[in-house]
Image: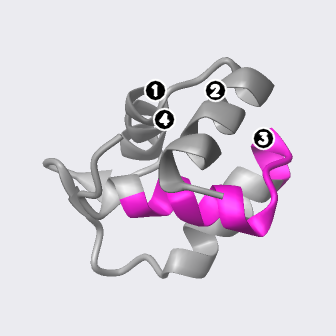
Amino acid sequence: MSFQAYIDNIKTKTGKTPSDFKKLAEEKNFIIEGKLNPNIKATEITNWLKDEFQLGHGHAMAIFATFKGKTE
């Protein structure tokens, strides 16, 4: 599955774009001033995405990749 297909499936499932997830991550201090919080591990973010949005591991990692700067 391509990266874009992951993003499209996430949007279909949750109604949220990577930008929406970034805003939510900022509210949780996973992202500070546009950058990943160095005190937060990837597992914490992917677990949040899995628990709150019922994303699978690959889909959660795709969102995490957008936080690291991979484009939509």
Quadrant of the rendered structure where residue 36 is? Answer: bottom left
Residue beneath disc 2: 11
Nearer the observer: mark 4 or 1; the answer is 1
> Is residue 38 located in the magenta-colored stretch of the structure?
no
> Counting residues from the N terminus, which is met first, the one under dot 4 or under dot 2?
2
Residue beneath disc 4: 24
Measure the alpha-carbon separation of dots 3 and 1: 12 Å
Q: Amino acid at mark 2?
A: Lys
Q: Tell me the element at label 1.
A: helix
Q: Which disc, if any, is residue 58? A: none
Direction from residue 37 to residue 42 in the image, left or right: right
Residue 30 visible from this viewpoint = no
- Name above or below for residue 9 compared with residue 35: above
Residue range corresponding to the magenta coloring:
51-65
Measure the alpha-carbon separation of dots 2 and 3: 11 Å
Q: Amino acid at mark 1?
A: Asp
67 or 6, nearer to the observer? 6
Residue beneath disc 3: 53
Q: Which residue is at 48% across, 81% downward?
A: 41
Q: Which residue is at 79% across, 28% downward?
A: 13
Q: Are marks 4 and 1 in contact (CB under 8 Å)?
A: yes
